[in-house]
Amino acid sequence: MTPKLNALLEQVNQTYPGTVMVRTGEEESGRLRMDQSKQSFLADRLLIEIPDQTEADFLIGNELLQLLLSLNGIVPQIFFGLTFEDEELDQQLVTIASRLHKMVMHGITFREMAKQGFLTKDTAKAFQAGIEDELTAEEDAIDGQHLFRLLSLVDAQIFNAVAKENGLKDEAKQADERYHALYPKASAAAKALSDIIVEADLKESRNIRKTIVRVFAGLDELLEEVDLPTVNAKQYVTLAPVLSERQLNGPVKNLFEIFHSEMTDFASKEKAYVGLGKQDQQNTFVIAPPTNPADRPKFFTELYALSVRELLEKLALPYILRR
């Protein structure tokens, strides 16, 4: 790793409650794939493995920056407290939602990697090679790979937007034209989401959270347009809130409405109740009421009267204090 990456790793280790290590494999394929890094835990150690040496510094730096953004409480975390009691479906939704969350972080990390000199012509070439290796060309009709192409092309368009900002306009233009030729429908749809991220001011946690919510909603709109099943991440995914002191000290009823969900609380295995933000309708917490229905009116009356801070502490849910 370069001295800059070693310094970034040291910075991460100053915050991480344990030790973060990085290992790179021997392969050199000429392709950069953002999904090829793997994380594994052993006791208090986190190992980030990059199997391919192609532009590995870009990928390592991106992983470390994402970790730092979460550890420093800049990017709201996501949690999965609900289940459809269908393991395969749950895993698909977790994978998609996690990718959407990372896409928004890429709006920050790709720019930082470019600023640090890690986004070069070679990086752009390898990134494009990775996309074309990953995706099959589109057919005339929407097929089962449409969502997968769409998600990958959002990342590609964020990458190209950052490349254009950093002296690689020709490379980015060529890649965009290539994607449009190979994947016209997915590429057009992806632009609706990538524009949300590229054009957002991602310097403050509050704006980052708003962008994540917009991306969650935007994906469902795109899927509805082509008659594909929606992800419904706004209800399925718990997104940590970004709150002011005044909001924290106010009652729950000021900020949230609690709804009975058709999904199941993963912990209690009972039908879940979900706290949705009044302004954005985003899942902010999942709560299990008393099993005896007769006890529920009192339970919810008392819950709505709690301060937001008391509720979040009771549920052991992290939040970000708005600066």
Image (cartoon, rainbow, N blue to C red):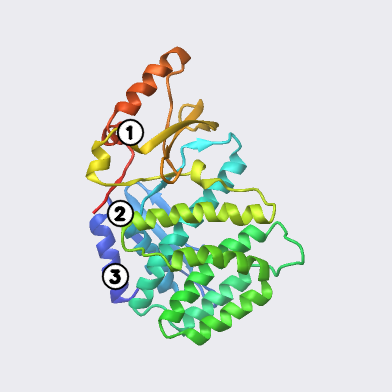
* Badge 2 element: helix
* Badge 3 element: helix
The quarter of the image holding the C terminus is: bottom left
Residue type indicated by callout 1 = Val
Give the residue displayed 35% in from the left and 38% down from the top: 255
x, y percent for residue 159: 48, 73
**Residue where numbered disc 3 is placed:** 6
Residue 110 in sight: yes
Question: In the image as oriented, which residue stretches furthest toward the right?
Answer: 140
Mark 2 or mark 3, earlier in chain: 3
x, y percent for residue 43: 34, 46
Label 1, label 3: how far apart the Cα atoms are: 44 Å
Q: Callout 2: 10 Å neighbours few (<14), some, many (20+)?
A: some
Locate residue 144 relative to residue 244 in the image: left or right: right
* Badge 1 element: helix
Against 128, residue 42 (above or below) is above
Q: Mark 1 or mark 3, which is nearer to you?
A: 1
Label 2, label 1: how far apart the Cα atoms are: 26 Å
Residue 38 in sight: no
Q: Mark 2 or mark 3, which is nearer to you?
A: 2
Give the residue displayed 46% in from the left and 43% down from the top: 281
Mark 2 or mark 1, earlier in chain: 2
Residue type indicated by callout 2 = Leu
Residue type indicated by callout 3 = Asn
**Residue where numbered disc 2 is placed:** 71
